[in-house]
Image (cartoon, rainbow, N blue to C red):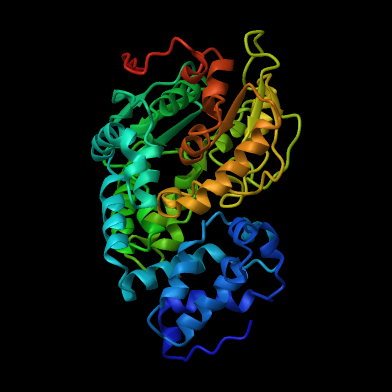
Amino acid sequence: MQTTFTPEQLKNPEIRRSNEILRACVHCGFCTATCPTYQVLGDELDSPRGRIYLIKDMLENDRDPDEKTVKHIDRCLSCLACMTTCPSGVHYMHLVDHARDYIEQRYKRPFSDRALRWILARILPYPTRFRLALLGAKIGRPFARLMPDARLRAMLEMAPKTIPPVSRNDDPQSFAPQGARKKRVALMTGCAQKALNTDINDATIRLLTRLGCEVVVAEGAGCCGALTHHMGKTRESHATAAKNIKAWCAEIDGQGLDAIVINTSGCGTTVKDYGHMFRNDPLAADAARVSAIARDVSEVLIDLSQPDNTSATPRPAKDNIAGIDAIVPREPVHQGLVVAYHAACSLQHGQQIKTYPKDLLRDAGFTVVEPADAHLCCGSAGTYNLMQPEISKQLKDRKIKTLKAKSPDVIAAGNIGCMMQIGSAAGIPVVHTVELLDWASGGPKPPALTREYDPKGEIPKLR
């Protein structure tokens, strides 16, 4: 694509990067075939190619964003399926992130939009605030239909019926490995996940320590910044990300880290991009160090599955492997359980990790099935299901239909947002992949599969 940015404009590093991305686009339109919003809405401007034209026009002319441009950029899920499809390597993620930052700085949204975004940015990244908000939403849920704003209705309807108690396993501390130590890793405990589902981190800690990892929850680490980053609130997202960078670098420079383990793939995509996000910041070198060892939990488990492997660098995520060494014994209690694997967009497109979770589940003895159109988004996409509820619901209904068509006993995913989205209407237990792997290797049965589960019960300390 030909661009006409002036030399003065190209002095801006953000414009310079967007120019590189725009010039890589060849207008082929392959991206439209895999774009969820284009499939639902059928509007060229709601496809990656259409949004690229809008962004190019806005940036080149240095103009304030108009309502039309903002509407179509807001409708983008950032599922990044277009990046998987694109034959020219257009880095759409960096381009749309820049567009959102530009819009946030130069466009005045209607008051209701500003208020909603302000509330989400100041509640979701903070577990305690989020818990209080969930309690309020639980009380207001019976009155959801009375809400005039579809977004407020979506917030109330998405609130879980039960809220787990705080897990002290998420506090800063260290968990010793069982047997000889193979790795020392930091676990990112996240923000919203700590309020919505404490079983995921608990299962991750049990599984990693069982496989020889010392697991550290670093002092000062918290939200990755993804939620505010995708709203275009760059200053806020960088402030939270900087806290993580400093916390993890303190561990790297102290006793050392072989990996930073992330079990929420949306967070993982962002942390792996810290090097780019902070490339023009004094924290650039430390951010790059963090990104270099950030790993999805499935990557670390694959690495640990290799005999006598203590390497800090797992095989590349794009490797398509078959017949990996099983890391868990096959037990009759779960042998043959049919697991429908939902591939989170941030994992399969954002991080290009497609086979690892399925390989691990199969080697653990589960029967793994995949839905039709597994590459398409479920409609969660961070805060998308709260800000674009109508489009999100159409995508959710489509995803649940394809998952249920496989008649699974349980649905597994690697991202809390997808789990909440699908679980809100699937009628089938939805668990994290690590919960099943933990169960298969000697841990407890995932609470979502246990009818007797009491969400108000005590959460055991693992240390």
What is the x, y in percent for residue 239?
28, 56
In the depicted structure, whether residue 9 falls above or below residue 102: below
Residue 37 located left or right of residue 221: right
- Relative to the observer, which residue lies in front, 6 or 253? 6
Is residue 250 among the parts visible in the rendering? yes
* Residue under the image location 47 percent in, 74 percent down: 69
The single residue placed furthest to the front in the displayed view is 146
* Residue under the image location 65 percent in, 21 percent down: 364
What is the x, y in percent for residue 409?
63, 21
Rendering quarter of residue 396: top right
* Residue under the image location 31 percent in, 50 percent down: 120
The single residue placed furthest to the right in the displayed view is 322
Rendering quarter of residue 115: bottom left
- Relative to the observer, which residue lies in front, 81 or 237? 81
What is the x, y in percent for residue 338?
68, 22
Residue 264 located left or right of residue 45: left
* Residue under the image location 42 percent in, 13 percent down: 453
What is the x, y in percent for residue 253?
34, 44
In the depicted structure, whether residue 67 falls above or below residue 361: below
Q: Please count the marks in the image.
A: 0
- Relative to the observer, which residue lies in front, 280 or 41? 41
- Relative to the observer, which residue lies in front, 369 or 151? 151
Residue 93 located left or right of residue 359: left
Is residue 291 among the parts visible in the rendering? no
Rendering quarter of residue 327: top right
* Image quarter (top left, top right, bottom left or bottom right) of the C terminus: top left
* Image quarter (top left, top right, bottom left or bottom right) of the N terminus: bottom right
